[in-house]
Image (cartoon, rainbow, N blue to C red):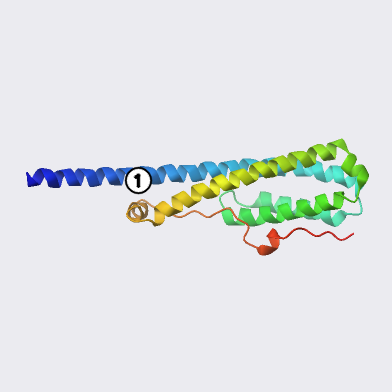
Amino acid sequence: MATWIVLGLIVLVGLYLVYLYNDLVRKRQMVREGWSGIDVQLKRRSDLIPNLVETVKGYATHERAALEAVTEMRAKAAGMPRDDVAGRAQAEGMLSQALGRLFAVAEAYPDLKANENFRDLQASIEKTEDALQMARRYYNGAVRALNVLVESFPSNLVAGRFGFTQEDYFEIEDPADRAVPKVAF
């Protein structure tokens, strides 16, 4: 009788370990799915920027610094490795700040603000920024769930044994990136 109880406990522990492993796999896949959503939105925003820059160039030729900053930050963000979450977050934060300055510069040009192409591009970028914000929240939630599982006992034993590690959050780390852009006229 005692052998059956011990055998039953061993089977239950084994099933629990399988459950923990599968939960870790599920959480890791959710993190990957979340990162893919961010990547899609970042690519969409990056594809819209050249059209925006060209539209603004025609109206604000002497605002070269703002245009060059957006172009430079876009190139830097595009050049970051896809799996470097912290690096991409920093580069994309700088790009967002440069875009904010560009939109602030555009406020000084009534003809540009009235341009239908500019308005459409601005609306598309704002829509993409909203989708990007939602994707960031989903990704960070998935990362939080995985990281809690990787750190919690007893799942940390399974995670360590099978090489599951914590993931980085997609966040803006530099407080200067959080500041509202200022444009001098």
Compared with 122, 71 (above or below) is below
In the shown orientation, is residue 33 left or right of residue 5?
Answer: right
Please give the name of the residue rendered at 62% of the width and 53% of the height, measured from the top-left corner: 88
In the shown orientation, is residue 176 left or right of residue 66?
Answer: left
**Label 1: which residue?**
21
Q: How many marks?
A: 1
Compared with 85, 112 (above or below) is above
Q: Residue furthest left?
A: 1
Given residues 107 and 89, the one toward you in this image is 107
Q: Where residue 109 sits: x, y (%)?
A: 91, 48
Q: Where residue 121 sits: x, y (%)?
A: 79, 39
**Displayed quadrant of residue 138:** top right
Please give the name of the residue rendered at 70% of the width and 43% of the height, measured from the top-left corner: 45
Q: Where residue 174 sits: x, y (%)?
A: 65, 63
Given residues 81 and 176, the one toward you in this image is 176
Q: Secondary structure at mark 1?
A: helix
Q: Quadrant of the N terminus?
A: top left
Q: Residue furthest bottom?
A: 175
In the shown orientation, is residue 74 left or right of residue 163?
Answer: right
Q: Residues within 10 Å of mark 1 (few under 14, many from 20)?
A: some
Amino acid beneath label 1: Tyr
Given residues 118 and 80, the one toward you in this image is 118
